Amino acid sequence: DDYTQISIFPDTDEILADVAPFLRANKTSGEYRDSQHYLDVHSRLLKEDYLEPIRRGLKDYKEAQIMGGTIKEDNLRFYYDVKLVKMKCDESRGITHYVQFSVRSHVPIDWEHSRRLMYGSLLVLSKDVFETTVFATVSDRDTTQLEKGLVEVTFQNNLDQIFTSSEFDVFVMAETTAYFESYRHVLEGLQEMRDVPLRRYILSIEKDILPPAYYLESPEVDMSCIAAHGRCLAPVEILDEDDWPDASQTILNESQMEAMKLALTKEMAIIQGPPGTGKTYVGLKIMNILFNQMRKMKNKQSPILVVCYTNHALDQFLEGMLQFCRSGIVRVGGRSSSEALEKFNLRELRKNPKMERHVKANMTMNVKKRKKELKTVASYIETYWQQSLKQETSILALDDLLEEVSSVHQHSLKDPRRQSDLNPHVIRVWLRATSADMENHMTKASIRRLAQDEDDYRLNSHSDEGSGPDDMGDIDDFDENKTKKQKEQFRDIARDFKQFENREIQIYQRALMLGVNMSDTEQESQEDEWQESGNLSHSKVFKLLHSVQPFSETDVTAITDVWDLELRDRYRLYKYWVQERKEKLAGRLKALTQEYRDILALKKEAINEKDVCILRSARVIGMTTSGAAKHRAVLQKVGSQTVVVEEAAEVLEAHIITSLNARVKHLILIGDHQQLRPNPTVHRLAVDYDLEISLFERLVNNGVPSVMLEEQHRMRPEIAQFIRHIYPSLQDHATVKFYGNIEGVASNVFFLQHSFEEKEVDDSTSKANTHEALFLTALCKYFLQHGYEGSHITVLAAYGGQVAAIKEAMEPEESMYKDVRVTSIDNYQGEENDIILLSLVRSNKENKVGFLKTDNRVCVALSRAKKGLFVIGNLKQIAFKSNLWKKILATASQERVTGVCMKLVCVNHKEHETYVSGHEDFQRDVPEGGCSQPCGVVLMCGHICNLTCHSWDRFHQSTPCRQPCLHTCREGHPCPLKCADECGPCMVLVKKILKDCDHEDTVPCHKDVSEHVCNQPCRKMLPCGHECRGACGECFATGKHAPCLEKVEKTWPICGHKNITECYKDPADDPCTTKCKETLNCQHKCKGTCGGCMSGRVHLPCQNKCKKPLPCGHSCEGPCGGECMPCGKRCPTRCRHGPCTSTTCGALCKPCTENCAMVCAHSTCSQRCLDECFSKPCTRTCGKPVKDCLHKCVSLCGEKC
């Protein structure tokens, strides 16, 4: 079959197939037959790389379902009780759905850091153990919603199954561990491609490489940017090798100069840069020359496209370009972390009014036109969606089913002998479902859906346009005022909706109080009896709706009089009509969805046209490989003739090919295939089909001309010697020979052997080793104690599970390690640091070492350190499985830098050595980073430092002396503080005579008596004849005495009462405190005061107990002066089944839902206890044996025997 016709998304047959699909290996030796052969091979391999984990995961799932075992989640992650909650039309993402999954079935997940349900992840949903499937992709990732078990998805196939599903249908959802987003756009690009650019080299492996065509216009090149200090370089005839300067005249070494020549004179250039050799540096110099050359050319040149594997590498490369290119750069993608590049981001440039001149007015109008069309279609979709929801939660009216109910059945339903023709609820009457207002009948699921609508409004009100890693995004005209207004509207809607939701929940709760069973099907009612007027209860209606199967079309045709049908058959006929309506609605929704997607595609094309205008005006475009594949349509129109790929050896070949446009004439690949290779998801495809071989490596292995940089500027020679097992010709630059030694250790490199076993990590196939995690955490602290900055130390681990284990070990002292980076080997490719601590992790009885036997990863792991490298692992086990490790350990043994213990050297006591093999050794022997001896240094104050030997603050510039202070005050009082503390004033209390009053008072030693306020009593006579009780110092300072507080009797002028009060108080200003004693209207005595009751004119409310009889017969316990409140005593009402369960007598009685107790041997009431009983008293003879005589009772049934 034609690879261009193969669906990007799989179908059910593919994922359930037992037969392996047709695959051919990547042709690593020799040439491809033609473009079709090449594209076919890579398309099939790439699709199988994401498809095989799904196939394998579903096979495991089905086997576990049959055998009853635990479901392995190595390939697929499963989510259960998945339900459709809401549909949404989004002008950026298209038609999306919210789905709810159970969070109870999972161990707690840290959604903030988890890679589950990432934007673009592929999901498989099924209701029948994956016999039929629906595929979806995650369209938005909101961690707060994920914690509630809610995710927004876009369904990609089988929309009929989605649109005919209801909120009661339950799915199982599987998520593949292969990140689908990185496959999807590359596969699309491969299918669109008809011919491979530069096929002469990529397919035919031609070794005679031609010069770039654009040098024919301007062959003279300015190379002043690489001139050595103090030298001037004349312009060079680029294609004349004799005209090139010697490397000694430049800032480049010999191999870098060769790389420069290759890149500038050949249309296909491959530059291999071993660790630390400056491949990015050379790449920037190449870009500098190309950039200058573009400015010289008369004809406008297409922008240079720079492509990197990671966002981090792209940011670094473009930041380096800012030194010589201050404008003309466009960074595409929303995941840049560089502030310097923020103004060059395409999203920012779109907002720039200056860029509008590059965009034609009709393009902007086209975007607006498409947006209007999208809103129109969205309104239709919303209408049909609401109609489809209505049929799940209520009984439809005949008007809703006119297309589905035949004319014969309509005529029968409206038969005036059976039912009034004017009754709009004829179907409810026919189904006996009119016992209550069905519009207010809400299931829990309905309430959940309404609550989600409100959440959705809230989500929209603060959503960020960059919620997913959409590199291009939408380019709606930016209007800040409009945005603010929309946010306010959303807040208003959310608030109004919350009130509506609360009202509906109140209706639901009220229905429960009235005894209406509104629960989901798990609490099915046992009743089959009739309600009043012969109608069914809500629960019975609900049960029938969701339990009966619809009639077949043949059965329906045979029915003439619908009123003659049994009740169950009526519901079957109704279900047939609803099913027909559901399928029609689904068909309309499907058609509208496709129309919406088509308009969205047209809108995207219009947006792309605007972006093309902006990008064509640029000189350099920066993108990641995945971004380039995703936005290949834009790149094809921009038509960059020069493409520079950094990290080219880490990227799958298909990713690079889809980054190239049809007009590319100059390709520069920079990387190192001996470091990290591409990492396919399926190991079998990587090894057996050579999918892990990059375009870079394939061309090098086939002898296409390349240059390897040979002088490294990173690693000290003791570290570099281990890398020469991989790069024998690698040389050291002079600067690396003068690094200082790492303090506190006997050697700058050490390989520590241990045999502590690894462990499995929950929810993944990753590994962790607790011993190594704790040891490296302690070693890291040891180096921090020696004054090394945390940012100068990196802890690397071979597995992601170990990264988490190390971070967990650091948590108790998190602030100490805040600047230390802990990451995996794979994530640290291309980076470096002064000190590297490396955890190899693997150690087990099976002698499995995983990818530690891969030379490429070993190369990366051992080449990140500049000054110090410290490795811990089960080295003997790893060397047993790897020849490279065997050579490395042989070198380490020869240099005496390996063993089961690591030697530490005290920086203060050089003769003192400590050997450590576990984390506990650090705490016991070097707790402060020095050694176990006392410090013993004489401090500036004359005391001896009494701390344990410490490596921090070795010169005691900031170490405080904790000995007692030896200073005394002038009165001879000793200082109570520590030696390092500032003495301050003497606070010893002494007796002193005060000058102003001659009182003796207690004063702090340092304080002058003139500043002290006397605390002794004043005792001077006041005008009233009493002594002043105030403090002497306060009276003196204020010039007046305190109010007299002596108790005296005074007469109140208004009422004539006499009361005891303070001397200073005036009865004319204070209310009288005599008790009122008046009799109130309620006949109780007033408990207020004369002043409070305004001399009897207004009395306070009575506070005695009310005791008035309430309607229930109890007495009111509230205050007499207030309104009587509902009774708070226990409700006395009871039925034969027990007392009322309401909390208080004043609350509405909770209805008893037990069966009616009107039961005898002759009859049974079919009502519930709460309903009105229609059973008449039994008139038959009792017939029970009389207790005393054993004769049968002749009284009526129910009377006392």
Image (cartoon, rainbow, N blue to C red):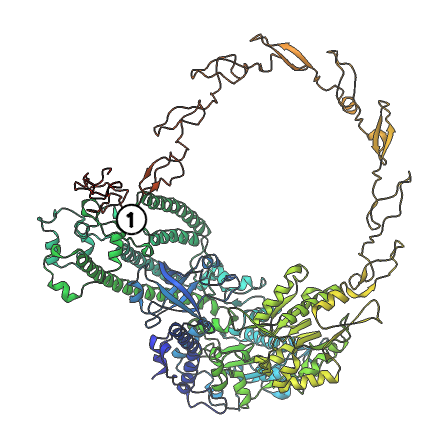
Left or right relative to 1003: residue 671: left
Q: Which residue is mark 1?
A: 441
On the image, the x and y values in percent for residue 737 come to: 75, 78
On the image, the x and y values in percent for residue 825 come to: 60, 74
Q: Is residue 488 visible?
A: yes
Can you tell which quarter of the image residue 874 is in? bottom right
Can you tell which quarter of the image residue 127 is in? bottom left
Examine the rendered structure and indicate whether residue 482 appears above or below residue 287.
Answer: above
Other residues around mark 1 within 10 Å, as few (<14) / some (14–19) / many (≥20): some
Left or right relative to 1112: residue 1187: left
| Secondary structure of the residue carrying numbered label 1 | loop
> Is the N terminus in the top left, top right, bottom left or bottom right quadrant?
bottom left
> Is the C terminus in the top left, top right, bottom left or bottom right quadrant?
top left
- Residue pictured at 27% horizontal, 52% vertical: 539
List the single residue furthest toward the left: 417
- Residue pictured at 25% horizontal, 57% vertical: 545
Q: Is residue 246 visible?
A: no
